[in-house]
Amino acid sequence: MIERAQVLHVARLARLRLSEAEVEKMAGELSGILEHVDRIGELELDDVAPTSHVVELENVLRPDQPRPSWPRDAVLDQAPDAADGAFRVPSPQAE
Amino acid sequence: MSELLELTVAEAATRIRAVELSREEYFDAWRSAAAGDELNAYLWRAEGPTVESDGPLEGIPVAVKDLFCTEGIPTTAGSRMLERHRPLYTATAVRRLTEAGAELLGKTNMDEFAMGSSNENSAYGPVRNPHDRERVPGGSSGGSAAVVAGNLAPCAIGTDTGGSIRQPAALCGIVGLKPTYGAISRYGMIAFASSLDQCGPLTRDVTDAALLLEAMQGGDPCDSTSVGIEGGIRAPRGEDLKGLRFAVPAGLARDAMEPGVRAVFEATLKRIEDLGGELAEAPLPHAEHGISAYYVIAPAEASSNLARYDGVRYGKRVEPEGDVVEMYEATRAAGFGDEVKRRIMLGTYALSSGYYDAYYGRAQRVRTKIAADFAAAFAEFDFVVTPTSPSVAFGLGEKTDDPLAMYMNDFFTVPMSLAGIPAISIPAGTAAPEGGGPELPVGFQIAAPALAEQRLLDAAYVLEQSLDG
């Protein structure tokens, strides 16, 4: 069972602001989903290696050749806020 | 309907190459058809042909899921977060199609960031099923399935992370192929769960699926996990299924299927035997745990991939009253829809300190077991077959209040995704929904070992020809 405090903790980790109604709803929904997921807790898996990726690849290398990147102006045109050739964000420390 | 709209991609391409049909005339016919979209299936439509290059797909208009980046053309991923986003580059899969002569016809609606099984999670409204507009087309590639089934495009591409090509193809009555993980480059495909995401075609028939796959497949320096399919893909062929061994998962949850779906599935198994194929049960004991593993692994990867939507470099930003962290939180609260938030929360929880081993670690071990089950089955069998979806298309709003019920749509498609193997859904018949009403399409899923797409397409072709006849 996911408690309200856990929802708030995870939301903070995920940088998501949830409304009061969303917190309540999320606690119930996540609990329901995890209750189903918990069935894999019954499987014997101690000697099983984890799979993070299905294609067996090691060290895919490519020639280290310089190539043009995107023009800076075009990239900054996409930004919600840009100034002096850089992305601009609010101060990390609010006044 | 214009006679031109009745041609398959293969037929139209042949006529265009023989100069019996002008590419302008063909494109115009499809542009007019797409302009009449009443299914909310398109988010953007081309005004005219964009590139002129010849190749096997010369003059073929293609509808592209809005998850693929297209240079200078709106690419929303079905999200408010990317409402006015115009990418600086084009996805490799789309570029390969246009290099083969195809023309971009439009961008199709989808569940936000490809998270969903009904297309009801789009920030731009749900897509409607062309067979019954009060029902869902499936998801997340619901727009791509609906435009092909609804005669608004001759063919389309989509992406499949846990069934997002196969399930909507089944619910709309068309062909949908999820290739082997790595067959097609993921470069420029907006990431959901990177170890599972794969691009593939949604088409009217198996031959067209092969044509599109051949155009798109291949290794790409921009995606180091892409390997391509050695020898490429030719047009599928075959007369019968003699000597081919088909496995039905032992203990396949027949009670998880609607009775109508079950009847079509059993009839299709009979058809395989009539065509000379051998049928037997194979143990796939961990497949039933696919949903549990998938709904840990995919959200975990998503929670990491979607960290990039922070209001700094592109996309939406909500101007805050406070510091930069408040800007992130306010932007993400406003930019993401409910299902995306749910998956980010689920994934962040599963990866968080104290829960990582119990959830993410265990899910990855279940993934190993599922892949091993398939490997064991393929030591004895050529294919594994299941229904594509437990039900026919369900009503709009029917499952939106119950996330777990929605996730169960992926029951038969998720195991193949976790194992990274190719699987195709072909239309196998129609059945009435459980609650009664007119009959709706039912899909039949065939899975094959990694990179055995040619064999898979050949078998699907033989079955398709027989079911059509």
Image (cartoon, coloured by chain):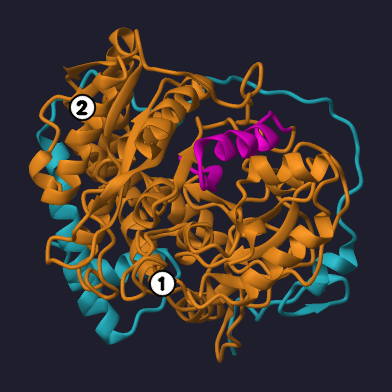
Chain colours: A cyan, B orange
Q: Percent x, y for residue B60?
A: 72, 50
Q: Is residue B98 left or right of residue B8?
A: right
Residue B270 tag number:
2
Give the image quarter of residue A32.
bottom left
- B214 within the magenta span: yes
Question: Gap in Å between the C-alphas at discs 2 and 1?
Answer: 33 Å
Residue drawn at the location 31% of the way across and 39% of the way down: B444
Amino acid identity at mark 2: Lys
Amino acid identity at mark 1: Arg
Residue B140 tag number:
none
Q: Percent x, y for residue B238?
A: 48, 19
- B217 within the magenta span: yes
Q: Which chain hosts label 1? A: B
Judging from the image, what secondary structure is the residue with disc 2 in? helix
Q: Percent x, y for residue A65?
A: 89, 32
Residue drawn at the location 51% of the way across and 60% of the way down: B306
Q: Is residue B439 above or below residue B333?
A: above
The boundaries of the magenta stretch are: B196-220
Residue at mark 2 shares a chain with residue at mark 1: yes
Q: How many marks?
A: 2
Residue drawn at the location 48% of the way across and 23% of the way down: B458
Among the two numbered marks 2 and 1 on one chain, the one whose residue lies closer to the N terminus? 1
Q: Quadrant of the C terminus of chain B?
A: top left
Q: Is residue A53 visible?
A: yes
Q: In this view, does B458 lie to the left or right of B434?
A: right
